[in-house]
Amino acid sequence: MRAVQLQAPGGPEVLELVALALPEPGPGQVRVRAVAIGAGGPDVLIRNGSYKWMPPMPAIPGNEMAGTVDAVGAGVDAARVGQRVLVSARELPQRGGCYAEAICVPAEAPFVLPDAIAFDDAVILGNFQLAIALLASNGNAPAQAILVPGAAGGVATALAQVARERGLRVIGTASTPEKQAFALAHGVDVLVDGDPARIAEQVMAQTGGRGVDLAFDHLGGALFTACLHALAPSGMLVSYNIVQGPPSADVFDTLRQLLGRSLAVRTFSIHAVDADRTLRRGLMEQAIALMAAGRVRAPRASRFPLAEARQVHQLLDQGGTLGKIVLHP
């Protein structure tokens, strides 16, 4: 079979299309033949060697694969052959492995895909799994509105859709006309200026002076502090990345200045549920059910052959790509 592999971390040039023996499922395993493979940020971290959950070298990147079971190992029901499934590396002993025409995984790892979900759409389900977990950051307390900066991003569009499906008002920011149109088409109700100096004032204007119950910040820096000022009483700021670095302002001092609102801050990682199989898989099952019912939808995908993985990683390094990137074997 063909796969994309790297011998050592580096730039896109370290990705090589190689020929490997077709893996045979061992006892308790199934082999999944790929139809669609997701490409995204965690794959870049594997490629450049900075992922906290690095697979050993030589490594095959890729954390999502949708396809069909085409072989089973000893002890696995042969009726599984032909089953439409999603493989998520969150369910595997190690991350990566999906930039390949086939993969062997424990039989209990794949998620069964309803016919209503196309293979290309299935590889974005991890973003909806993440969005559902993010929205539970405040213990699923009653909420009216949320703030999603960078609302055209992959996780952000999933967040916006799940939140709106729950009846929440979604306020977002987006930096270009193209991104603004994309955000509004994928769950955002209203856009405000993303300038940290103005965002809180505009959020308050959009919420009648109340603020949002949850703000989801992936940038950090000045935006982190601005999001605190945009929160409603008992609101929570959820930090799920710090692309621009940590805030320069004293966070605790800011919280004390806003003491009358009783605000909270949470740092979030989906890896917090790595050891909780029931919760982790339950989040994905919720995501699958939402998409199968048409209550959320995958953004448009940009499709590339698996052989063009280097070019895809060049795009990922540049940033700004809208929608999911899908590799086809």
Image (cartoon, rainbow, N blue to C red):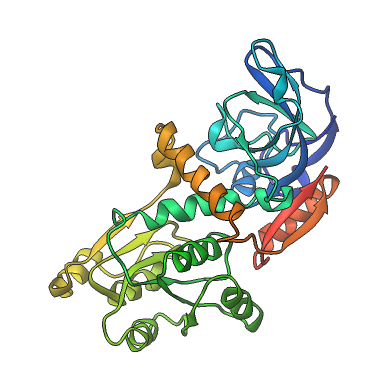
Decide which of 91, 269 is in the foreground and name it.
91
Picture layout, residue 124 above or below residue 152: above
User: Quadrant location of the C terminus?
Assistant: top right
Residue 102 position, x and y percent, is 77, 31
User: Quadrant location of the N terminus?
Assistant: top right
The quarter holding residue 302 reads bottom right
Picture layout, residue 36 above or below residue 20: below
Residue 275 position, x and y percent, is 41, 31
Decide which of 65, 189 is in the foreground and name it.
189
Evaluate whether residue 62 shows in this view: no
The residue positioned 60% from the left and 59% from the top of the image is 294
How many numbered tags mark residues here?
0
The residue positioned 41% from the left and 69% from the top of the image is 167
- 309 lies left or right of 194: right
Residue 320 position, x and y percent, is 65, 68
Decide which of 51, 300 is in the foreground and name it.
300
Residue 240 position, x and y percent, is 42, 56
The quarter holding residue 58 reads top right
Decide which of 169, 261 is in the foreground and name it.
169
Evaluate whether residue 54 shows in this view: yes
Picture layout, residue 145 above or below residue 299: below
Picture layout, residue 89 above or below residue 131: above
